[in-house]
Amino acid sequence: MAHSRVLVVTLAIILILILVIPRGHVVYGALYECQDATGVIVITDSPAQLTLCQTLGAPSTDTSPPVSPPPDPPPESPSSHQSQPEPPPLDRLSPTTIMVPLQRIGSLFVVSLTINHTREARLIVDTGASHTILSRRIALDLGLYADTQATPVTLQTVGGPVRGEVVPIESIQVAEAEVRGSAAAIYDLPDAPAGVEGLLGLSFLGHFRVTIDTVHNQLMLVRTTP
């Protein structure tokens, strides 16, 4: 009789457990994801003596913002590493190119030259003058009236037409550039700067391709006729 009562009680307890515990649920202690002293990840239900433990399956508690990768550097222009080559000096453009220094007086450019291999003079460079113009002092110093009769002529200059006398000139030399057998007009320029004795015109400049460098005050002459 007593044995039957114990059996009934036992069956009742088992029935209660079946009803209370949900089906499919496994009963065990909580599991933790931890690191040991060497930094190795350990899964355990006994987190004692371990560090950085977190319940397995729980959301991460790391609230640090995500680190974005650094942006790609902007593409570099090819010209940023390539400096522009400087142009070669003008006197190296051609073996026939001659560079002559100029003196600037206000808006005028003055060049030093030699007439008939003996007389030095300073003349204004004038690409608008049809002839080279020399002062009467130069004509007297060189005796330009002695061997020939002067020919009266009207000359066109940047300042307008002027009357002068044209005489032959054996040689006009500017640096290494020389023109032989040309002509010049004899005329005293009014209001010429001190020390300036005429104009260097097309009777000389017409034998060259002429460039005036107004930045560096230079005259570039490239011969165009033999």
Image: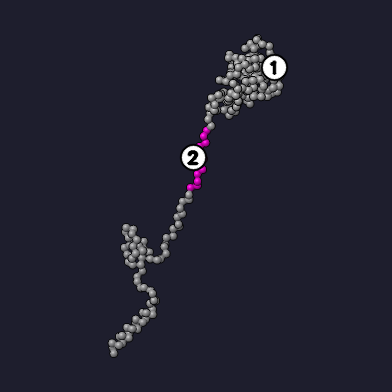
Q: Picture quarter containing residue 94?
A: top right
Q: Is residue 146 above or below residue 225?
A: above
Residue for badge 2: 81
Q: Secondary structure at mark 2?
A: loop
Instruction: Name the residue: 58% across, 14% down.
Output: 117
Q: Residue at x 63, y 23 (%)?
A: 206
| Kind of element beneath mark 1 | strand
**The C terminus sits in image quarter:** top right
Read off the residue under disc 1.
164
Return the x and y of residue 85 as percentages of the image width and height: 51, 34
Residue 147: name its quadrant.
top right
Q: Nearer the viewer, residue 11 or 127?
A: 127
| Mark 2 touches mark 1? (CB < 8 Å) | no
Task: Please give the range of residues in magenta.
Answer: 73-86
Mark 2 neighbour density, 10 Å: few (under 14) some (14–19) many (20 or more): few
The answer to whether residue 37 is visible is yes
Residue 108 in the image: above or below residue 152: below
Mark 1 neighbour class, 10 Å CA radius: few under 14, some 14 to 19, many 20 or more: some
Three-letter amino acid code at the position of disc 1: Gly
